[in-house]
């Protein structure tokens, strides 16, 4: 009996002291995507249903990316081991994710995660702490610097922009499917979200859309993976 009790205590200790997984399960369900107060590309606010999916808890770090590409040279603006990897093209980001049997998240997946659980899923989104409006030379911070949002995900607002899987189309919301939208089949620019440490808080809004050519590499642009 004592051995059973000791085993129970050990299991409880391990559970309470376990390291969190590097990814978070976002449950299936409906949320409001876009905003009627934004630019034409962000309108209209509309309902979207997503099946459940996993999203990385943190932005991909320099240390993790270098395990995939040892020849990678870190950006001076994001140089610590646990700082987000930056100066990565869309193709390089996707290749990293695919090496782990993952992929870049869709715009819909990213926005649902950014808005947080259903109680925070309105147009204003979750009240996540954002690392923004700092001097350019402040640079990015470690991927776990600020508290997580309601889903347990860090830095969806600020720190660095994040590459997404979708091609960008300003009119896509007016014709996108209600269930599991994947974005246009083709395009010239890829979607990015989240803002960075030197952008204003405006760029971190959940529904704010931006885009860049897939070959672009910036000191303030990183990524995370999904599956």
Image (tube, rainbow, N blue to C red):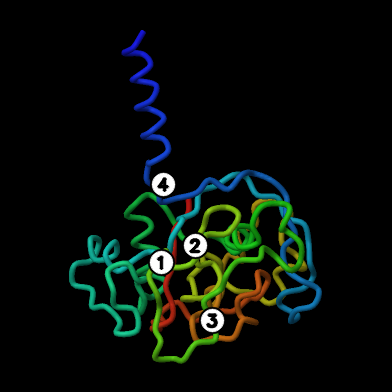
Mark 1 or mark 4, earlier in chain: 4
SS for tag 3?
A: loop
Disc with the residue nearer the chain's start (2 vs 4): 4
Task: Look at 30% across and 82% down and name the residue there.
Answer: 75
Q: Quadrant of residue 95?
A: bottom left
In three-dimensional space, the C-alpha distance between marks 1 and 3, rounded to whole angstroms, equals: 14 Å
Label 1 vs label 4: CA separation? 14 Å
Asked whether the viewer can see residue 41, the reply is: yes
According to the image, label 3 marks what residue?
132
Q: CA distance from mark 3 to mark 4?
A: 26 Å
* Relative height, residue 98 to residue 61 (above, below): above
Q: Are marks 1 and 3 in contact (CB under 8 Å)?
A: no
Q: Which residue is mark 1?
A: 143
Q: Label 2 belongs to which residue?
A: 154
Farthest-out residue, front = 2
- The residue sitting at the left extreme is 71
């Amino acid at each position: 009996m004592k051995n059973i009790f000791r085993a129970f205590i050990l299991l409880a200790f391990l559970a309470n002291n376990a390291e969190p997984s590097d990814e978070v399960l976002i449950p299936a369900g409906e949320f409001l995507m876009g905003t009627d107060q934004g630019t034409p590309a962000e309108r209209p606010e509309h309902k979207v249903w997503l099946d459940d999916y996993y999203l990385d808890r943190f932005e991909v770090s320099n240390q993790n990316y270098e395990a995939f590409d040892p020849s990678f040279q870190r950006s001076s603006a994001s140089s610590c081991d646990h700082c987000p990897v930056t100066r990565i093209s869309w193709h390089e980001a996707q290749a990293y994710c695919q090496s782990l049997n993952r992929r870049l998240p869709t715009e819909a997946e990213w926005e649902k995660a950014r808005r947080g659980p259903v109680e925070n899923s309105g147009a204003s989104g979750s009240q996540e702490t954002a690392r923004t409006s700092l001097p350019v030379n402040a640079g990015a911070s470690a991927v776990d610097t600020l508290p997580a949002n309601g889903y347990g995900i860090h830095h969806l607002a600020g720190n660095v922009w994040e590459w997404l899987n979708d091609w960008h189309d300003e009119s896509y919301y007016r014709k996108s499917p209600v269930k599991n939208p994947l974005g246009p089949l083709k395009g010239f620019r890829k979607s990015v979200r989240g803002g960075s440490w030197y952008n204003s808080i405006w760029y971190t809004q959940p529904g704010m859309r931006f885009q860049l050519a897939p070959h672009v590499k910036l000191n303030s642009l990183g990524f995370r993976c999904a599956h």
